[in-house]
Amino acid sequence: AQRVTQPEKLLSVFKGAPVELKCNYSYSGSPELFWYVQYSRQRLQLLLRHISRESIKGFTADLNKGETSFHLKKPFAQEEDSAMYYCALSPNTGNQFYFGTGTSLTVIP
Amino acid sequence: AAGVIQSPRHLIKEKRETATLKCYPIPRHDTVYWYQQGPGQDPQFLISFYEKMQSDKGSIPDRFSAQQFSDYHSELNMSSLELGDSALYFCASSLGSGRQETQYFGPGTRLLVL
């Protein structure tokens, strides 16, 4: 069975501080991992995906297969980063997505 | 840029009533996905359509049905509504149905069943 776990429901950091949003997954194959972000009153949107290995808005995430983790990191948090962040997994078969329960990030000025 | 449109944004129904949720994908997108997110729960995949045919099925109750029309918009029909159907229903669209295709989400329809 596939499962995505985001252990932190709420996370608060001060502006300029580093931030890390944790994501762990359980899957026996080679999934694709994503981070989605939902800003207040806006739609869910893709932030980044592990296969592209890109940095979006200063965020990066590295897939660690040994630890089955895909933590989202940013060295210096900004106020506009305050949002709900969802980690998601797509199995290597089918086109379903499995989302974590999300982490609400608040960046304190 | 155009995004996924969902209609209505909010809906209130009573038990045993029916509801229809609509999803309009991004232009040229041929695949539509439906998700249900209950309060404090993970979004759960319900069903998807590619080129107007059902492409995948998740945890969609038998009381629900969905289809994709010739213009690629999709409708989720929900009958005999139950209190537990109260949730946020997301629609997403993509170009192509492979797992490499990024899904773009709509803002969701919040359904409240009283």
Image (cartoon, rainbow, N blue to C red):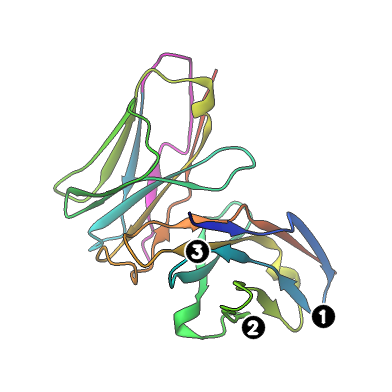
Q: Is residue A5 above or below residue B68?
A: below
Q: Is residue A22 left or right of residue A57?
A: right
**Of circles 3 and 1, which is in front?**
3
Q: Give how far across and how far down residue B66 sits, in percent.
A: 27, 37
Q: Which residue is mark 1?
A: A16
Magenta span dominant secondary structure = loop
- Distance in Å between CA atoms under marks 2 and 3: 28 Å
Query: What residue appears at the point 60 percent right and 73 percent down from the top-left corner?
Result: A70
Label whose residue precedes the other's in the sequence (3 or 1)? 1
> Was residue B59 drawn as part of the magenta stretch in this picture?
no
Residue A58 - label: 2
Quadrant of the rendered structure where residue B80 is? top left
Query: What residue appears at the point 63 percent right and 66 percent down from the top-left corner?
Result: A24
Query: What residue appears at the point 70 percent right and 80 percent down from the top-left corner?
Result: A74
Label whose residue precedes the other's in the sequence (2 or 3)? 3
Kind of residue at disc 3:
Tyr
Residue A27 - label: 3
Kind of residue at disc 1:
Gly
Which chain letter goes with mark 3?
A
Q: Nearer the viewer, residue A105 or A94?
A: A94
Question: What span is in magenta?
Answer: B1-18
- Distance in Å between CA atoms under marks 1 and 2: 12 Å
- Distance in Å between CA atoms under marks 3 and 1: 35 Å
Kind of residue at disc 2:
Gly
- Quarter of the image with the C terminus of chain B in it: top right
Are discs 1 and 2 both within one chain? yes
Q: Is residue B62 above or below residue A3?
A: above
Are discs 3 and 1 both within one chain? yes
Label whose residue precedes the other's in the sequence (1 or 2)? 1
Q: Nearer the viewer, residue B40 or B29?
A: B40
